[in-house]
Amino acid sequence: MRPISPLLQLSLLVAALAALPVASIAFYLLAGGTGATWQHLVDTVLADYILNSLRLCLGVAAGVILLGVSTAWLTAMHDFPGRRVFEWALVLPMAMPAYVLAYLYTDWLQFVGPVQTALREAFGWRRSDYWFPDVRSLGGAAAMFTLVLYPYVYLLARNAFLERSSGMLEAARTLGQGPWQVFWRISLPLARPAIAAGVALVLMETLADYGTVAYFGVDTFTTGIYRAWFSLGDRTAAAQLATLLLGFVVLLLLIERHSRGRASYHNTTGRNRPMPGQRLQGGRAWLAALWCLLPLLLGFLLPAGLLLRMAWAQGIGEFGSRFFHLAGNSLTLALLTAALAVGLALLLAYAARLSRSWLARGLNRLVGLGYAVPGSVIAVGVLIPVTRLDHWLAAGWQQLFGHNPGLLLTGGIAALVYAYLVRFLSAALQTVEGSLGKITPSMDDAARSLGSGQFAVLRRVHLPILRGSLFTAGLLVFVDVMKELPATLVMRPFNFDTLATQTYNLASDERLAEASSAALAIVVVGLLPLILLSRQIARGRKV
């Protein structure tokens, strides 16, 4: 048996650390048994957690399919006023965290907000004279998630529509099929795997959210985990809820994989040239433009305008020392996590390239599952073993040096950065793996034939080629960390706040105007990768 290389051994260690949180939850669950807290949850709120999570997922799935697929079809296969702007601008709502959108629309649509106030003044209504939907509800939460997460489905569906063979579409049209028949019978079935993958990503993000559902008072698994850990002080109950939530995520992944079945979606013709978009005329053209404008307006333009107005009205005082202190905390966490994630992703991807073994590929797939695990689950899984390690280190330190150093890991940001890495390392790994896979192995062979070792090839050949991809991977992790709320709320050190936690705390206290500056900073940072993505969409336009 060939010995495992040192690089692959390091990859094995990284994969083990990435899998430790989930393993610790399972171990703690089996060792802890069922207690009074768990029985209380089963008797009172567990059914609500399950039903609310299911109803939320169903509502969000229906919303993102409707918005994502329809806008993707319109921008990919048609030509109408504003189409060239919409095809990249429709991804902008991804920069708006769902919990920020929830705070803004609650303030805008509540009884004393500008919308209802204007209606009462215009029609002379009183409170009992009209009905207005309550945004702070499960339906409102589903709408918030739909508006900020539909771009996942839009991007994947649009790419699938553009990549379909033009020969199949032309053949369908010659057989008398109209645009709607072509869509329902050919384009939509061929794009089904991409749509299912996008919906799975959306639902994982929905189940991982805490800020939106907590603010709207919707009891889900994430709010239950937070309540069991902090309000009830029961780690075993939190681990049990985290296990159920993880089961939901695994079920989503299995459903997405099963939806593909054994079907294959291949182009069997070389006639794959780009097709000109069908030009829409008159009312249909303006209806298409208005339909594409709707999610962009509600998901980004209007909320961004409300944030700017609040920040401007609040004045420059909110950008004082407290704001810069919070921004410094967020930047420190994001930069440190991004740098470590890029380094570890490069290690894992390069080890898999060198070994070309099933073990290396399996380790990378194991690490890649971290993104599917909600931040609250990872937080619980990290805190259980790290807290025990902290106490063990403190006891050993006191025995050796005569004084207790306190909590070395959970008392600082080390455990929090570890949780971020488990959650977001996958984003960096997929980016680096994709770019590294495009470098032909003949370049490695040529460099080694000239006497360069493995690390010399990496430094002199691969790194210059991968520079842009490494920057992109770091940027993706940076933005994810800046927006992350559940894990930060659970694991942040005492008296350590970030822009995300400050936004949540102030908005929860109904001090939305004061939270606007922090929320606006998060949105601005989230725009950075979307600007890069929009430029790629514009350069790669096919129709």
Image (cartoon, rainbow, N blue to C red):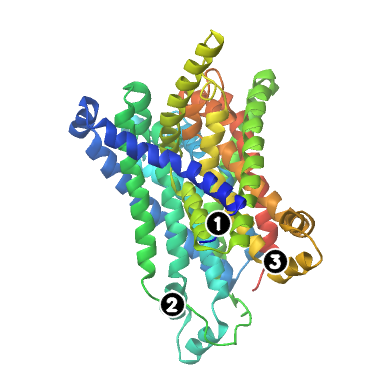
At a point 56% along the width and 38% down the height, the residue shown is 483
Q: Which amino acid does label 3 sit on?
A: Ile
- Of label 3 and label 1, which has the lower sequence position? 1
At a point 33% along the width and 37% down the height, the residue shown is 27
Q: Is mark 2 on a helix, strand or loop?
A: loop
- Of label 3 and label 2, which has the lower sequence position? 2
Q: CB under 8 Å between callouts 1 and 2?
A: no
Q: Is residue 287 visible?
A: no
> Alpha-carbon distance for marks 3 and 2?
27 Å
Q: At which x and y percent is residue 411?
A: 53, 20
Q: Quadrant of the C terminus?
A: bottom right
Q: What residue type is labelled 2?
A: Ser
Residue 3 marker: 1
At a point 57% along the width and 62% down the height, the residue shown is 289
Q: Which of marks 3 and 2 is in front?
A: 3
Q: Nearer the viewer, residue 411 or 140?
A: 411
Q: Would you name the residue on which mark 3 appears?
A: 439
> Alpha-carbon distance for marks 3 and 1?
27 Å
Q: Which amino acid does label 1 sit on?
A: Pro
Q: At which x and y percent is residue 402?
A: 54, 7
At a point 34% along the width and 27% down the height, the residue shown is 235
Residue 264 marker: 2
Q: Mark 2, residues whose alpha carbon is within 10 Å: few (<14), some, or many (≥20)?
A: few
- Of label 1 and label 2, which has the lower sequence position? 1
Q: CB under 8 Å between callouts 3 and 2?
A: no
